[in-house]
Structures are given as structure tokens and as C-alpha cells.
Image (cartoon, grey):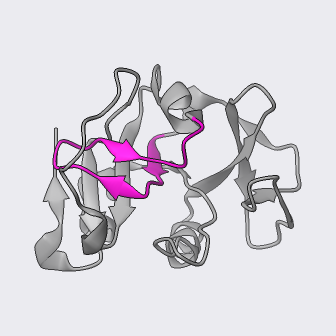
Amino acid sequence: MLFHSQLWKEAKTIAMVRSQSFEFNTQPIMDKALQQGKRVTIPKTLSNRQLEFFEVDEYTTYQFSNFGIEEPHNDSLINKENIDLMLVPGLIFSKKGYRIGFGKGYYDRFLADFEGKTCGLAFAEQLNNDWQPESFDQPVSRIYTDTLERSFVYG
């Protein structure tokens, strides 16, 4: 379980996306992080397929991006090297930690030189090994699923 992991316990700053209705719900995770005094960062997409992460709290307002994802409406930029743990979204995850995202490569570009810890959150149905990652795909180090017995650890 994510909240009992060393990744969670050691992280002071956690990056995550505001989930869409069909994704693993990140709102309870954000709430728990804020309750525990952790910094939470949410990404904004930039025009050159880059991500930047901004600190949020329970009072942050959001606006929808062109992709229909809620992005923070503030300018509290957090540098990449200050993020301890990144919860990486995906549609499909393999047993080696690779993921199929939404096809634009934003996270793969960000993760290429990211030195913090990474994990994916998925429903058990999202685990699938019937595909091959691309050369630029960046794996996550751990995957936590919606059922405790299906929690996998990679890397």
C-alpha cells in the first residue's frame, strides 16, 4: 500500500496529476499528503510538450488544459530536483514498470533526467504485458494497484 511504503514515508514533496473520472482517484492521496504536511505539486503542460510542477494546497483553484486535465491556476513553480516522489499516470502498465500514457510524451520527457522516486497507481485491469515499450519510454520503479494482493514492486 502506498501510504505504508518507504517511498511515501520519506517523501517531503510529491508530484501527481489531478485525475480524470476514469483514472485512479488522486484526490484522497493529495488530501492525505497535505494532512501529513507534505508539499503537493500538480503539473501544467507547456507548448513544447514539457511539464512544470506547481505547489498546491486545499485553496488552490484549477483551470482545464486543452487536454481536459485540471491544472493549478498559480505560479508557485517547484523545481524538478525538489520533487521526491512522482505518481506517474498511465493507461496501461507492464510488469517491468513501463507505461502507456496519453501519447504525447510529456512524462517520458520529464522523467528522462528525473532523479526522484517514481511509482504508478493503477487498477488491476490496467496491468498488461502484451506490448513493447518504445526506446524513449521511461519506466516507473513501483506500481501500486487498487487491490493489496495485486501490489507489485519493480526495480
Q: Position of residue 25 (x, y in %)?
A: 51, 76
Which SS type dominates the magenta stretch? loop
Residue in the image at 56% along x and 74% along y = 35
Q: Which residues are magenta?
A: 84-104
89 is within the stretch colored magenta = yes
Q: Say left or right for 74 vs 127.
A: right
Image height check: is 113 above or below 149? above
- Say above or below: 75 vs 147: above
Pick the quarter of the image with the N terminus.
bottom left
Q: Quadrant of residue 65?
A: bottom right
Q: Is residue 135 magenta?
A: no
Q: Quadrant of the C terminus?
A: top left
Q: Position of residue 57 (x, y in %)?
A: 73, 65
Please tell me whether residue 144 is drawn above or below residue 117 in the rendered image: below
96 with respect to 136 (left or right): left
Tell me how many marks there are.
0
In the image, residue 61 above or below residue 101: below
